[in-house]
């Protein structure tokens, strides 16, 4: 088997990084890692979305509590 067609599993075993026993587990972890890297980064809110959210959460178009608004934004978009 040449190095171009050798599977990742076989390369890991040949290099001594894993044994035949645990090679499949490591290959699965590597594949999951690269799949996660291939996902596009989530985008945060646009300026327009923030402004609209500010208007909808602030009584009478004013933000009496900027810390409260910041917490509301983080709660809504904090994972992005």
Image (spheres, rainbow, N blue to C red):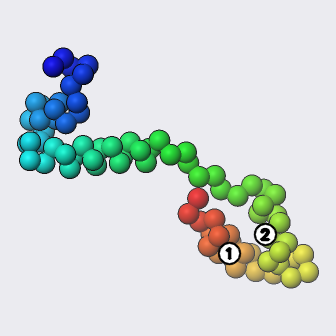
Q: Quadrant of residue 54?
A: bottom right
Please say if 3 is above or below 59: above
Residue matched to label 1: 72
Label 1, residues with CA under 10 Å away: few <14, some 14-19, many ≥20: some
Please say if 65 is above or below 32: below
Front-most of 44 and 1? 1
Secondary structure state at the residue bearing disc 2? helix
Q: Is residue 53 left or right of residue 77?
A: right
Front-most of 67 and 48? 48
Q: Earlier in the sequence, mark 2 or mark 1?
A: 2
Q: Quick check: can you spot residue 63?
A: no
The answer to the question of whether label 2 and label 1 lie on touching residues, with beta carbons closer than 8 A, is yes
Residue matched to label 2: 53
Give the percent coordinates (x, y) of residue 45.
Answer: 70, 58
Give the percent coordinates (x, y) of residue 2.
Answer: 18, 17
Residue drawn at x 9%, y 42% is 20
Give the percent coordinates (x, y) of residue 51.
Answer: 82, 64
Q: In which quarter of the image is residue 16?
A: top left
């Amino acid at each position: 088997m040449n190095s171009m067609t050798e599977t990742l599993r076989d390369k890991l075993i040949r290099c001594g990084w894993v044994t035949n026993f645990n090679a499949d587990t490591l290959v699965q972890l590597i594949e999951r890692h690269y799949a996660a890297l291939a996902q596009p980064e989530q985008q945060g809110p646009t300026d327009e979305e923030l402004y609209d959210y500010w208007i909808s959460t602030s009584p009478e178009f004013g933000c009496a509590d900027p810390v409260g608004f910041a917490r509301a934004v983080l709660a809504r978009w904090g994972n992005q």
